[in-house]
Amino acid sequence: MSMDKTFGLLDIDDDSEPIVKNLEADGQHYLDNTEQMSSSLASPVTKKKLEKNKISLFCCLDSLGNEILSDNALLSLINLKDCSLSKQNIEKLKKIVLKHKLVFHEYDGKIGRYKGKKMLTIRLKDKDSLPKPIRAQQLTRGKEAEIEQQIKQMINKDLIESSRIDFRRINSLIEAQSHHIPRIQNFLNEAAGKRLYSTFDLKSGFHQIALDASSRKLASFVTHQGIFSYKVMPMGLTGSPDAFQRIMETVLFGLTNTFVYIDDILTASDNELEHLENIEAILKRIEENDVKISLKKSSFGLFQINYLGYTIDFHGIKPHKDKILALANKKSPTTAKEVKSFIRAASYFRRHIANFAHNAKPLYRISNEFKWTNEQVTAFNNIKIALINAACLKKPDSQGTYEIHTDASTQGIGAK
């Protein structure tokens, strides 16, 4: 491929992944869309080292901008490292991916835009109680340049628009959405005990949902370049997760053994044929609604899957070992805030720990005043040990016979 194709300079840091920046060389400006070039680094590239500087010249990028990936390039992005499908069914999986290639962000570099009628509408509790506008924060020139680049990208992708109003403190005034996020444990129970699992990650999920025109002024942000309003669902706004969950449940409604939690989709099956059918059904629904998935972040046909902090397989559900290791390696807290943070993180896995409330009681007693005595040290260490030995849980057999032993005291209540 000739050198007159679009290319850009990349700043390379030995301790991190390559980051694309708008740089100039020989008086020429080579790069307009840095994000797309950054995402293209996974694709084959022609690379020439520039001596003496930690800078490399990349050209002939397969997926730069909105260029289309070849079928082979797209298939190379499928992660088959732990795939348990037979060779024959892996080939069928590849055909399914190519049949629905428009679903994948990597194919054309585009962000999806949900075409259904539902969108996020922001409603205030009291329309007369709007926060006062605030000024842009003082930043260094380097940070301002980065903000300018991100704003340019978001405008080019039709995600934001120039605005005259800024209400950064709007969240406390927004009326709560009526749709609730599902309980994680409910669909983990349903998914556990299957033979095969696949997960799908929606690319910039919130940005694929339109924001009602009347609500845009309420989702504004201020910069040194002016005030901008989101045209799509912003992250961090009260109601965004609920609205997104409702839309994705609508998109995937009725699909067998398919679960969605915000932008993470999981499907579970008892055999390979059923699993391929589930995968294709999900991709078909996603394609029909003009939503995009990240192929690189999707996993296919695994015996065991890590999902929302848990490991799920045929034997049941257990906390993900990396999450447990992170908690087990926590140093003793030095403030009440750190204690509360540890309790919240450990409590996420409390179903897998016998007598959690009783063991954690000394830590719960620490409120605003921090007191770290031997009692708290013992409780802290016992919870970490219990996390390391957390039980694997499985949904009871509905046809089985069980005995439940309950207990209650001033220290707590429980059953086993």
Image (cartoon, rainbow, N blue to C red):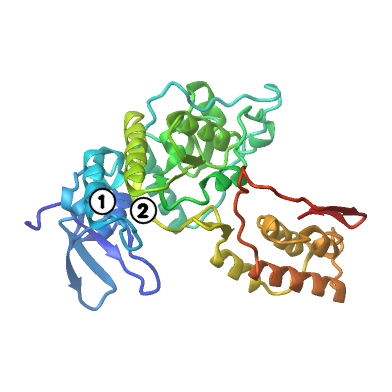
Q: Is residue 325 above or below residue 270?
A: below
Q: Residue at x 28, y 44 (%)?
A: 109
**Badge 1: residue crowd in 10 Å (few <14, some 14–19, many ≥20):** some
Q: Secondary structure at mark 1?
A: helix
Q: Is residue 387 left or right of residue 416?
A: left
Seen from this angle, which residue lies furthest bottom? Answer: 52
Picture quarter with the N terminus: bottom left
**Badge 2: residue crowd in 10 Å (few <14, some 14–19, many ≥20):** many
What residue would you read off at disc 2? Answer: 301
Picture quarter with the C terminus: bottom right
Marks 1/2 in contact by CB < 8 Å: the verdict is yes
Splitting the image into 4 quarters, where does residue 236 fall?
top right
Q: Position of residue 76 (x, y in %)?
A: 23, 56
The mark nearer the N terminus, 1 or 2, is 1
Q: Is residue 378 left or right of residue 226?
A: right
Q: Position of residue 98 (x, y in %)?
A: 21, 43
Q: Residue at x 63, y 27 (%)?
A: 178
Seen from the viewer's position, the closer of residues 279 and 241 is 279
Q: Is residue 197 left or right of residue 372?
A: left
What residue would you read off at disc 1? Answer: 89
Q: Position of residue 370 (x, y in %)?
A: 84, 66
Seen from the viewer's position, the closer of residues 139 and 169 is 169
Q: Amino acid at mark 1?
A: Asn
Splitting the image into 4 quarters, where does residue 172 fall?
top right
Q: Residue at x 35, y 62 (%)?
A: 82
Mark 1 to mark 2: distance in Å?
A: 10 Å
